[in-house]
Amino acid sequence: MLTVDDLARDERFERIRIEELVFDARRANDRRNSFAPNSLESPDASRQLMHGIFVGEIQALEGAGRTCYDFDTGTGPDEVPFEMKLDMARQCWDEARHVEISCQLTQHMGTRIGEYAEQTMLFEAACNADPVLRLTGVNRALEGLAIDVFNAMRDYGDAVTDPVLYFCEDWMLADEVTHVKMGSDWLRRLTAKDPERQKNALEFQRAVDKLFSFGGFRGESEENPVHLARTFRKMAGFSEDEITDLVDVAAEAQAEAEARMAAASPAE
Ligand SMILES: [Fe+2]
Ligand SMILES: [Fe+2]
């Protein structure tokens, strides 16, 4: 197991804790969606999101890589099948390419590594000691979030008539659907004879998905910058019920973050 402090980053990267981002009291009185294409702040908001995608791709690469490395090959409860490691290795190849593409897109959009901070919650969710929970954390929750975010960024590229951005996001979105589909398939395969383990894995995914909704970043209303990409999630093996549940999870996350921000901000 590798801790976040041991992740390979050079001096250009700035680290931040996720709590500082989600519970920032300045957000309490400002629920505008600055990422909406007609918002005056959207150029900055989109640069910030692209930087977030870039560091997210690095952590997705690290998460999939650790799933290959941290477990022995086999069919026992602490092991993963060789075929699953092959899928994770293929995913690493994709994510490495996404890192390159996203880094070049940050420059294309006018920012650079380190202008925004990196939080490492994505990687932390990829550190579960149970391979099935690891798989749900990485390939269903993290990669599912990637689907939602890339779909939003692709739409943004279309809205602002940026064919480079649109094209890159469209291609990466196709890869992410494959990564979630691998997670959905392996989760069902590994827990086919163990409903209790499947239940635990899905509960863990729910907890991670709540964290990954970032207290209102992802949701279903206009004020949420990123919406659930229903069609692509269905293609990736999410059932209708799972998508409906995810909507509830995102709403819960937003309500809790708002209550916490309201409690933290001084009374007017
Ligand atoms: Fe990716
Ligand atoms: Fe991915």
Image: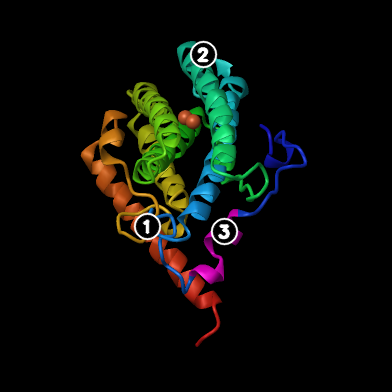
Q: Pointer 2: what residue?
A: 74
> What label sits on residue 21 in the rendered view?
3
Colour pattern: rainbow
Snapshot quadrant of residue 163: top left
Q: Horizontal and vertical percent for residue 95?
A: 53, 26
Q: Could you tell me which secondary element the residue under label 2 belongs to?
A: loop
Left or right of 74? Residue 202 is: left
Quadrant of the drawing holding the N terminus: top right
Nearest the eye: 172 or 146: 172
Badge 2 amino acid: Gly
Q: Is mark 2 within 8 Å of ligand 2?
A: no
Q: Pointer 1: what residue?
A: 38
The mark lying in front, picked from 3 and 2, is 3
The mark lying in front, picked from 1 and 3, is 1
Badge 3 amino acid: Leu
Nearest the eye: 132 or 78: 132
Badge 1 amino acid: Asn
Q: Assess whether residue 20 is covered by the magenta stretch.
A: yes
Residue 195 visible (yes or no): yes
Are discs 3 and 2 less than 8 Å apart at CB? no
The dominant secondary structure in magenta is helix
> What label sits on residue 92 in the rendered view?
none
C-alpha distance separating marks 3 and 2: 40 Å
Residue visible at 68% across and 49% down in the picture: 15
- The residue carrying pointer 3 sits among few (fewer than 14), some (14 to 19) or many (20 or more) residues within 10 Å by Cα, namely some
